[in-house]
Amino acid sequence: MISSACEKEQTGQQQGPNLPVVEGIIEENGYPMVVLTRNQAYFSGSTTSNDDGNWIGDAVIYVSNGPQTQQLREYRLTDAAGRAFRAYTVDTARLRDAFRGETGKSYTLTIESEGKKLTAITTIPARSLQLDSAWWAPGKAGIMARLTGSTGQQAYARYFTARKGEDYRPGMHPLSSRSGTFNLQLAEGPGTAAGDYGKGDTVLLKFCNVDHRTYDFWFSAGRAWAEGMDPLGPGARATGNVSGALGYWGGYSVTYERIIIPK
């Protein structure tokens, strides 16, 4: 979830200082998860977990798919590196009210926190941009993927890679394509050194179709990173979809692939 998109003006998103920052996702066959912080550098790649005051607690958060609504519960968690963070996700004491993400459905997020009400809506799209295969390309020193756009309409995706046993890290830029089959080198993202993956490694690829608003956010964030800017800073301000906050709420349909780099 914690990982480390193209307009400066954002529809439905206020401009100005001291706005809360939201990263919320709901994956196909997964429960929703929301991180809420007051640190605008959250998406810049800097770690906020060392300062407990950056996390916003005691929020009331609901996710609805229309006929059903579930309230999320706040947890203190740690990532694979042992760093602490807070997140809101399924309440394990109320699993009868819980539901998982489904492809083709829309989900409304409502956050009530510190006297503010934040709202957003996203869809878990169909796999319009399909991952056909992936492999290690020694000459390019990177991961190649064969993708097919299958609907004739614009499709959008993000991808993540991880050495087996480690956290997933996102690619720098999301993808967009119409119909057709093509090969693409998957560039490593922020916080990933060139050559991190080497002989004998098992690399896991997580390929996700996303909706247009999620693509917009990560396209503008990637552009800011490439220019050495904070995506949520005043000079960049990535295009989010959460009314009253910075950040985004996004749905993901997910395909996994395993790549073994020869020794």
Image (cartoon, rainbow, N blue to C red):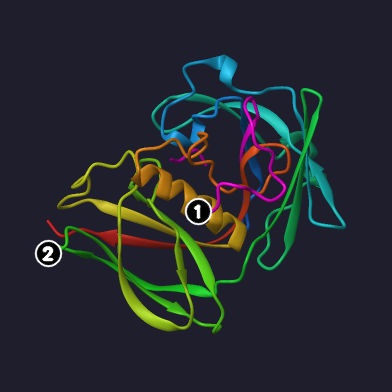
Res 228 seen here: yes
The spot of residue 194 in percent (x, y) is 21, 46
**Quadrant housing residue 190:** top left
Q: Is residue 55 magenta?
A: no
Q: Secondary structure at mark 2?
A: loop
Query: At 42% from the left edge and 25% from the top edge, which residue is drawn?
Result: 82
Res 211 seen here: no
Structural distance between the alpha carbons of marks 2 and 1: 30 Å
Query: At 55% from the left edge and 52% from the top edge, which residue is drawn?
Result: 7
Q: Considering depth in this image, is 42 or 63 the residue closer to the camera?
A: 42
**Label 2: few (<14), some or many (≥20) within 10 Å?**
few
Which amino acid, mark 2? Gly
Q: Is residue 4 magenta?
A: yes
Location of mark 2 (residue): 139
The spot of residue 44 in percent (x, y) is 44, 34
Q: Tell how many labels.
A: 2
Locate the C terminus by quadrant.
bottom left
Q: Marks 1 and 2: in contact by CB < 8 Å?
A: no
Q: Nearer the viewer, mark 2 or mark 1?
A: 1
Location of mark 1 (residue): 5
Q: Residue furthest right?
A: 67
Query: At 84% from the left edge and 57% from the top edge, which residue is drawn?
Result: 66
Q: Which residues are magenta?
A: 1-25
- Which SS does the magenta portion mostly show? loop
Q: Is residue 32 left or right of residue 253?
A: right
**Label 1: few (<14), some or many (≥20) within 10 Å?**
many
First in sequence: mark 2 vs mark 1:
1
Vertical arrangement, residue 55 with respect to residue 29, above or below:
above
